[in-house]
């Protein structure tokens, strides 16, 4: 599969390829295929990489941190990149084997305790998306490692929830919480040693500071909302399996997000940031 531009159809093919692998645990395929509902985020990252790749003829070298089942890295390979991936957890070794069969250098690594298992100055891009908020530790050590493995002039793409979003502010005004669901956290996760949900979310100012304090030049730091097109794609393709009513909330919020974007209002649910490692000399 070689495409010049990432599409939701192309990403869904990748997800189906991973979900159909017989090594996957039986409860994983629906989760993997269902991730297309937010697939626009991965395609946004891949479009940025393809649009800012080095001008020489060599394929862009991409590392995805917090890769889960490796769909971004697998699709990057299909788009002509050289891709590596890192994650840690009970299923990581299974993900590693599946990804390796499709050309991804997937490493099992606990980024909270271990250095990235790659040499200095190895990648043109490092993606660090939907990960920071799950750390029970400061992301400083991970950002320093990302800086180390990037080539001079290489870039990291960071995506994380916007703690200062309009939606969070309204929740607080009306007596709600901006944290994860309390019943799930308090009861369902009571036996877990480490909670796997969100430990800390960030504002634009904080994310900008985090990048600057780890020696990155901040090229972008802006707010956006979930991609409406991918949510509509999911509902259209999966409506027989999906309970559409719970999705209506996200549909409304995504439509509002399109309005905020047109009006250039920083009210969305996500922060997108790009940090660049200074060129040598």
Image (cartoon, rainbow, N blue to C red):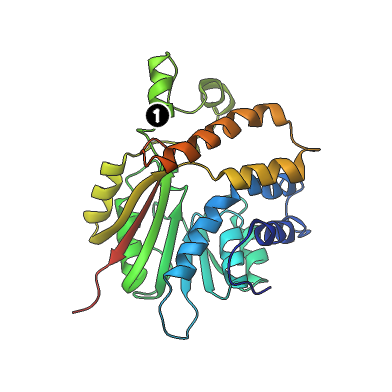
Q: Is residue 70 visible?
A: no
Q: Is residue 92 above or below residue 253?
A: below
Residue nearer the viewer, 237 or 134: 237
Say which residue label 1 marks. 166
Neighbour class for label 1 at 10 Å: few (<14), some, many (≥20)? few
Residue at 43 percent of width and 73 percent of height: 53
The location of residue 204, given as percent across then percent down, is 30, 43
How many badges with numbers are in the image?
A: 1
Q: Is residue 76 visible?
A: yes
Residue nearer the viewer, 180 or 34: 34
Residue nearer the viewer, 80 or 228: 228
Q: Quadrant of residue 43?
A: bottom right
Quadrant occupied by the N terminus: bottom right
Residue at 57 percent of width and 51 percent of height: 40
Q: Is residue 278 left or right of residue 134?
A: left
Residue located farthest toward the left when viewing the structure as drawn: 281
The location of residue 4, given as percent across then percent down, is 59, 72
Quadrant occupied by the C terminus: bottom left
Residue at 50 percent of width and 33 percent of height: 256
Q: Is residue 162 above or below residue 82?
A: above
């Amino acid at each position: 599969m070689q495409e010049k531009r990432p599409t939701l159809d192309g990403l869904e093919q990748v997800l189906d390829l991973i979900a159909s692998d017989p090594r996957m645990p039986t409860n994983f395929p629906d989760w993997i295929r269902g991730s297309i509902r937010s697939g626009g985020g991965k395609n946004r990252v891949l479009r940025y990489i393809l649009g800012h790749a080095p001008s020489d003829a060599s394929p862009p070298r991409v590392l995805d941190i917090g890769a889960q089942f490796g769909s971004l890295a697998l699709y990057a390979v299909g788009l002509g990149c050289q891709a590596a991936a890192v994650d840690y957890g009970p299923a990581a070794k299974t993900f590693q084997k599946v990804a390796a069969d499709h050309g991804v250098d997937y490493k099992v690594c606990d980024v909270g305790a271990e250095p990235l298992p790659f040499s200095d100055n190895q990648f043109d891009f490092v993606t660090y998306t939907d990960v920071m908020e799950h750390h029970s530790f400061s992301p400083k050590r991970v950002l320093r490692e990302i800086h180390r493995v990037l080539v001079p002039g290489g870039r990291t793409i960071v995506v994380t929830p916007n703690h200062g979003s309009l939606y969070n502010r309204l929740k607080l005004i009306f007596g709600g919480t901006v944290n994860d669901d309390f019943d799930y956290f308090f009861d369902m996760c009571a036996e877990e040693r480490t909670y796997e949900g969100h430990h800390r979310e960030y504002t634009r100012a904080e994310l900008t500071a985090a990048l600057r304090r780890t020696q990155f030049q901040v090229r972008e730091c802006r707010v956006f909302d979930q991609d409406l097109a991918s949510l509509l794609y999911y509902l259209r393709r999966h409506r027989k399996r999906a309970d559409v009513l719970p999705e209506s909330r996200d549909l409304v919020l995504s439509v509002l997000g399109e309005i905020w974007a047109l009006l250039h209002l920083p009210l969305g649910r996500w922060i997108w940031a790009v940090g660049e490692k200074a060129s040598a000399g």
